[in-house]
Image (spheres, rainbow, N blue to C red):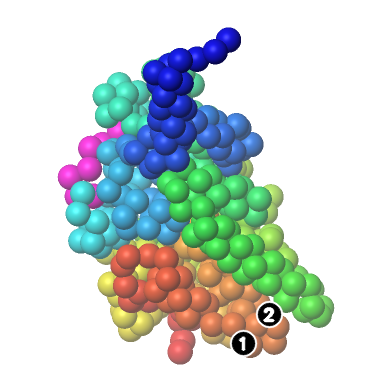
């Protein structure tokens, strides 16, 4: 069949327009994204509108400060509610964050599929635990044509950390930055384990971790198999809470802690509000303030004879360093205390300072980890 000149030009124009639409950033094209749990999700890229359920600092590191220009809604409670001091610091440098629409939160059943759908995002990033919990809302959102990409740093599995980072990068169009971050995490994580493998300890060091939130007169949660408990087993320590608490977290009574006689004790602190007796860590606290908040915990009744107390191995560490893209910093700090010879050249504080300088829009400051005695 022969085309006349007018038909030929029209056909050629159609092909050119089609090719242009796929090559120009203003036009979306479907792409397959593999999320943290191995799901293959089709997302029209580049995305212009993003909803975010969790992992705000990870999103920031991967997408950059400019990535927030495309965010149209977040679950505010896990950031503004749980860590308002840090939320305020980020709000000062991200113009649209303070007034960001709220999607609601999975833990208190306020998460709203209707709110998500009304915002018309091109994609919803969700935590694995949120995705698992919200069967009905998840189905409503996907039925509305909004793809959900699952992000999971909470499992504390190397492969999921890397898959989450790469998924964020692919969706946000920052794949090179995401790959750099994934490789950085893999390198730091693997380096910690390689150094520990060289340690020649006669026995596994015994470690106790507690959430230092309510004050020294109250024994806070300890952890088994998750969060700090997962870090302890990963770095080859004996977690004294193993088998002694009924679930993944919960308090261990004073008698059990004293009887176990741990070699090292770590109290997880933070910048919680309305917690005057908490261990204070984070951007806004100097070393003297952190130490003075930690000292009452080290001076608990019955603690004077513990090996950890006698050897000055009672520490404060920021609770927010756990289950993140930068949790290798916490691994470095704890491992350096447990295996000092193998980590002589490692400075965990400098590691965190460097991470801020390269990947986060807020400046490093404050105290994030230190021993009770200088």
Quarter that holds the N terminus: top right
Residue 26 vs residue 5, the one in the foreground = 5
Residue 118 versus residue 166 in the image, above or below: above
Q: Nearer the viewer, residue 76 or 63?
A: 63
Tell me the residue that label 2 is attached to. 339
| Percent position of residue 160, x then y | 61, 48
Mark 1 Cα shell of 10 Å, populated few (<14), some (14-19), many (≥20)? few
Measured Cα–Cα span from mark 2 to mark 1: 12 Å
Q: Is residue 236 above or below residue 344?
A: above
Q: What residue is disc 1 on?
A: 345
Quadrant of the image for the C terminus? Answer: bottom left
- Name which residue lies at 35% across and 69% down: 282
Q: Nearer the viewer, residue 136 or 305?
A: 136
Q: Who's the residue at 69% across and 61% down the image?
A: 234
- The main secondary structure of the magenta stretch is loop
Left or right: residue 305 compared with residue 26: right
Indicate the position of residue 55 as horizontal and vertical percent values. Answer: 43, 49
Residue 26's quadrant in the figure?
A: top left
Q: Considering only order in the chain, which callout, 1 or 2, is on the residue closer to the N terminus?
A: 2
Q: Secondary structure beneath disc 1?
A: loop
| Span colored in magenta | 97-105
Relative image position of residue 71 (x, y in whole percent): 30, 43
């Amino acid at each position: 069949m022969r085309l006349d000149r007018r038909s030929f030009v029209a056909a050629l124009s159609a092909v050119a327009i089609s090719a242009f639409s796929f090559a120009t950033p203003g036009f979306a094209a479907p792409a397959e994204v593999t999320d943290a749990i191995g799901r293959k999700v089709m997302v029209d890229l580049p995305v212009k509108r993003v909803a975010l359920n969790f992992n705000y600092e990870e999103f920031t590191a991967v997408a950059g400060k400019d990535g927030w220009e495309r965010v149209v809604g977040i679950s505010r409670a896990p950031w503004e509610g749980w860590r308002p001091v840090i939320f305020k610091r980020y709000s000062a440098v991200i113009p649209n964050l303070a007034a960001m629409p709220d999607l609601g939160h999975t833990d208190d059943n306020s998460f709203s599929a209707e709110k998500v759908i009304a915002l018309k995002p091109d994609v919803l990033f969700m935590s694995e635990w949120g995705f698992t919990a919200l069967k009905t809302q998840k189905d409503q959102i996907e039925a509305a044509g909004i793809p959900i990409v699952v992000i999971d740093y909470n499992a504390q599995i190397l492969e999921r950390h890397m898959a989450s980072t790469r998924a964020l990068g692919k969706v946000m169009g920052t794949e090179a930055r995401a790959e750099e971050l994934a490789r950085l995490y893999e390198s730091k994580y693997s380096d910690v384990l390689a150094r520990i493998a060289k340690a020649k300890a006669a026995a596994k060091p015994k470690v106790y971790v507690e959430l230092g939130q309510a004050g020294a007169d109250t024994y806070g949660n300890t952890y088994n198999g998750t969060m700090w408990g997962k870090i302890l087993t990963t770095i080859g320590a004996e977690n004294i809470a193993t088998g002694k608490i009924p679930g993944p977290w919960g308090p261990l009574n004073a008698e059990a802690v004293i009887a176990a006689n741990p070699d090292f004790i770590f109290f997880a602190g933070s910048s919680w509000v309305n917690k005057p007796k908490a261990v204070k860590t984070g951007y806004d606290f100097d070393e003297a303030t952190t130490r003075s908040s930690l000292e009452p915990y080290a001076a608990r009744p019955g603690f004077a004879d513990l090996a950890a107390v006698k050897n000055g191995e009672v520490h404060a560490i920021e609770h927010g360093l756990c289950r993140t893209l930068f949790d290798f910093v916490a691994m470095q700090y704890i491992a350096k205390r447990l295996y000092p010879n193998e980590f002589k050249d490692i400075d965990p504080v400098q590691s965190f300072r460097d991470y801020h300088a390269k990947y986060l829009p807020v400046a490093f400051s404050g105290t994030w980890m230190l021993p009770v005695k200088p």
